[in-house]
Amino acid sequence: MAIINLQNVTYKYPLTDAPALQNINLQVHEGEFVAVIGPNGAGKSTLCYTIAGFVPHFFKGEITGTVEVAGNESSKSSLHEWVLNVGLAFQNPFNQISGAKYTVFEEIAFGLENIGIPREEMKQRVEDTMKLTGISDLAERSPYSLSGGQQQRVALTSILVMEPKVLVLDEPTSQMDPIGTREVFGTIRAMAERGMTVILVEHKVEWIANFADRVIALHEGKILLEGTPQEVLTSDRLTEKGFGISRYTSTARKAKEQGFWKKEKLPVTLEQAVEGFVLTSRPIPETRGASG
Amino acid sequence: MNIEISDLQFTYPTGVAALRGISLAIAAGEQVAIVGQNGAGKTTLVKHLNGLLRPTSGSVRIGDWDTREHSVAKMARRVGYVFQNPDEQLFSKNVGTEVAFGPKNLGYSSDRVNSSVADALAMTELSEKTETNPYDLSPTWRKMVAIASIIVMDTPVVIFDEPTTGQDAANLARIANVIKILRDRGRTVIAITHDIDFCAENFERVIAMSQGTILLDGKANDVLGQEEILATTYVDPPQLTRLGKRLGFRNTVRNQDEFLTALGMTINSS
């Protein structure tokens, strides 16, 4: 059974005419890792807010259709009931930090305090989750003294510690270096393997291709494409609509025109790319720069 | 306007030694990308270029100005700095006023302010949005407002701190275009970026930093091909560089044209 079930969801923010989401139908199974891609204004963050209950409970506005998570219907639940099942990490981690706590440790404990978790259990969960996300060394720092990438890890940790059934992440690694990104994707994948359901908005296509089970392409508030990473991320329609695509895909598409890509499917990962390019026996011409 | 950094050391009041002896010369009109792991000292380094930070020891010169001898307000005539988070620098009620603030503050004539604003808005594709409140725009467009409000001052040096963070494909192309126009006008552009593919496609010189020092500095192809050294500062080479290596290319390639040429394809130069 689907843990997330959106039926014909259409939503307008207050004082706007155009819907931010139009007729969205989406079912996500428990433990599935779904990536959401789309250009600016496609409705990605709004979709996150909808699954996380902020739409309509916090942002108000007009919603039609039904939003169900873990068997509860959004319109019939309060936000404080909803957050026990769904955790959202905002696009900008700065917006998420409570401002009420002096240290990272206390910040991460904030959600657990609010739901009345006993002190000893709370300490243990905070310590374990900080270890999982690799921020134990930041425990005594002020959340405001951290770099953007570190704040993003704190934001993610403060959600994971709540052990939500559904984890909604809006560009959780946008300010991280590549190795930080890899670690966070690894952590998210591991949470999905343990049965947590993950909805991830992300521009970094190569990471999606390597980690997600399914990709949803949003465009102007509607679902344009849905399928496996390779199906969606190599579709011609993405480039037409202004989506970012992998350099592997765009380069293979160009190579295919002159017969230098031999496979039917275009690649989205390095491994797929290594398999399909045609290497000629001709001497390799000199390119700019030094040998390597 | 040349930039000359000699044996720059900087220690934060907390005792963290963020820069441990940086020497660097950047010639007028160069396009330089700075890469490296979180905490490598990239932002600390560029904050020295407009005097937001002053050296603990060593010196930073922008042309004939030593940053220790001039106010940040004065340095703003020579070095523009686009912050990573646009929300840290925007405060006006509409885009037009926001973008005009810098040149007005520098005391330019109203004619010059008007023409600079029109030029900066055109470069950032904001000409249709002058009456909009920046906070009614999406974060990606707010980034363009932040960029416009800096390039409008027409400084010889422009710094971008993580310009690509959270940007979609269309906005990445807009930012790349701004950098190209600045290059064509002979401006020096220095950008910190984690987006190594963007770096490979838009910068001729790359500096890799690690733990407050410079690890690599050179032509983009030379630096981006050093997979093992880059890994020590948590940077992966660009996608096509890695692919070229796996396919056994003799030379480092960093963009689509170089890759396809190395593959043996004939490329129509565009």
Image (spheres, coloured by chain):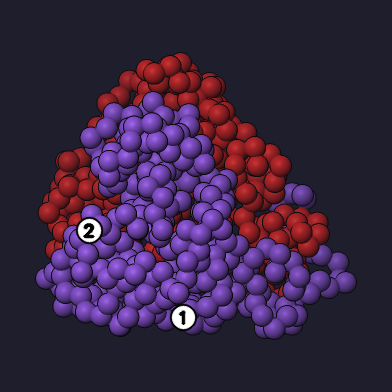
Q: Quadrant of residue B108?
A: top left
Q: Residue at x 80, y 56 (%)?
A: B250
Three-letter code, disc 2: Leu
Q: CA distance from mark 1 to mark 2?
A: 30 Å
Question: Disc 1 vs disc 2: which is toward the camera?
Answer: 2
Chain B, chosen colour in render: red
Residue of label 2: A79
Crowding at label 2, few (<14), some or many (≥20) Cα neighbours within 10 Å? some
The quarter in which the N terminus of chain A is drawn is bottom left
Q: Quadrant of residue B104?
A: top left
Q: Are marks 1 and 2 in contact (CB under 8 Å)?
A: no
Residue A195 in the image: state x and y as whole percent.
Answer: 51, 59
In the image, A23: left or right of B173? left
Three-letter code, disc 1: Leu
Residue of label 1: A225
Query: Of residues B90 and A177, which is closer to you in this image?
Result: A177
Query: Of residues A196 and B239, which is closer to you in this image?
Result: A196
Chain holding disc 2: A
Query: Of residues B67 and A123, which is closer to you in this image?
Result: A123
Residue B25 in the image: state x and y as whole percent.
Answer: 53, 33
Q: Secondary structure at mark 2?
A: helix
Question: Relative to residue A220, is residue B14 depicted above or below?
Answer: above
Q: Residue at x 39, y 54 (%)?
A: A164
Q: Is residue A238 visible?
A: yes
Chain A, chosen colour in render: purple
